[in-house]
Amino acid sequence: MTNIPVNSPETFGDAEQSGTAATIDLVAQAPEPQPGKQRPAVKRVLQGNRANLILFTFLPGQVLPDHEAAHPIFVQAITGRVTFTVGDEVTTLTPGTIMHVDQHVRHRVDCPEDADPAGSVFLLTMLTGEDR
């Protein structure tokens, strides 16, 4: 049996902000794209009570291969589009579409080859249930 990575908030580095109230411009805070890399750029932008916000910038062809989250998640495209696969279900996420996935459910994220060459910004909200 193949070991599937299980990601927690710490997987994505230290949070840039925390506190009882925070305003975040998700497009401005998105990590710089990483041309030539197989995986997207990633940055944890907020560690809050019971939730973390993690931003990715995908370039066409970049992939987050099969993995699981240690906590329930919400995922959404902020700009551009990505495909989100859970089992046999493939969903195209575009701005305004949000998806919920329970903890320890295998999934993957792909940025289509014909997506915006400037990049697609993708938001992961991890519902940790943990106080800061």
Image (spheres, rainbow, N blue to C red):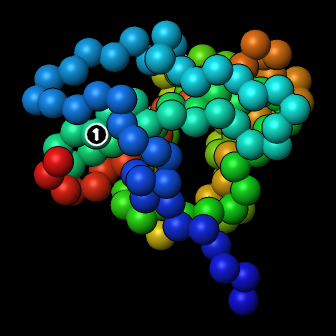
Classify residue 5 by image quadrant: bottom right
Residue 53 location (% of width, % of height): 38, 36
Classify residue 120 by image quadrant: top right
Residue 22 location (% of width, % of height): 21, 21
Between 20 and 81, the residue placed more toward the observer is 20
Residue at image location 51% in from the left, 34% down from the top: 43
Between 56 and 112, the residue placed more toward the observer is 56
Residue 122 location (% of width, % of height): 56, 30
Above or below: residue 114 compared with residue 72? above
Looking at the rendered structure, the number of numbered marks drawn on it comes to 1
Residue at image location 76% in from the left, 13% down from the top: 118
Above or below: residue 48 compared with residue 67? above
Label 1, secondary structure: give it. Answer: strand
Residue at image location 72% in from the left, 82% down from the top: 2
Above or below: residue 67 compared with residue 53? below
Q: Residue furthest bottom?
A: 1
Q: Residues within 10 Å of mark 1 (few under 14, many from 20)?
A: many
Quadrant the N terminus occupies: bottom right
Three-letter amino acid code at disc 1? Gln
Q: Is residue 75 visible?
A: yes
The residue identified by callout 1 is 47
Q: Is residue 93 visible?
A: no
Residue 105 location (% of width, % of height): 52, 67
